[in-house]
Image (cartoon, grey):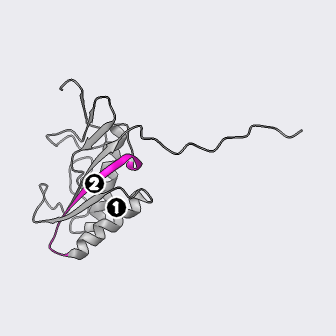
Amino acid sequence: MSIGIELVRPPGLTGTVPYAYAAVTDPGRMVFTAGARPVDAGGATVGVGDVAAQTRQVVTNLVTALEGAGAELSDVLKTTVFVATTDRGDLVAASEVLREAFGDHDAPSTLVGVTVLGHPDQLVEVEAVAVRDSWREPAPPHDETVAA
């Protein structure tokens, strides 16, 4: 590992890949994820033939990778979404699942239809850039006054 780079391999994600799932840079705030794939902890493809099911698994794996790096979906600055398809309907299906997962946090995203992805039966992959320890809206003050 290089000085200033923390490579993250969270437990719960398959160890069969030849790369880290995320990287964090000095001073420890920027998080770059590898493309999250629709695989289970054993490395088997989930939701074969189903873009929406695969996107849900990708989100699960992306959340795990981000958490392993000390971040969460609301810390994401940008995503790039790859869908192996020539059908715009598949792009829409993946986009809808991601929109639901990210909720009001509508970070910039690029959605791309590609010919093929690297894992057998894989239709979806999402990579993200995040900032851990992002500023969040402070909670409203809590009044601890007890009525007499």
* Proximity of marks 1 and 2: CB atoms separated by less than 8 Å: yes
Q: Seen from this angle, which residue lies furthest right? A: 148
Which amino acid does the dot numbered 1 rest on? Leu
Mark 1 residue crowding within 10 angstroms, few (<14) / some (14–19) / many (20+) = some
Looking at this view, is 43 or 5 the one in front? Answer: 5
- Magenta range is 73-87
Q: Is residue 62 magenta?
A: no
Residue bearing the label numbered 2: 79
Q: Eyeballing the image, is 53 above or below 8?
A: below
Q: Quadrant of the C terminus?
A: top right
Q: Eyeballing the image, is 108 above or below 30?
A: below
Q: Element at badge 2? A: strand
Residue drawn 18% across the image and 75% down it = 87
Residue bearing the label numbered 1: 98
Instruction: Tell me which label, 1 or 2, sits earlier in the chain.
Output: 2
Q: Main secondary structure of the magenta part?
A: strand
Task: Give x and y (percent) for residue 23.
Answer: 25, 37
Q: Quadrant of residue 67?
A: top left
Mark 2 residue crowding within 10 angstroms, few (<14) / some (14–19) / many (20+) = some
Task: Give x and y (percent) for residue 133.
Answer: 41, 37
Residue drawn 75% across the image and 37% down it = 144
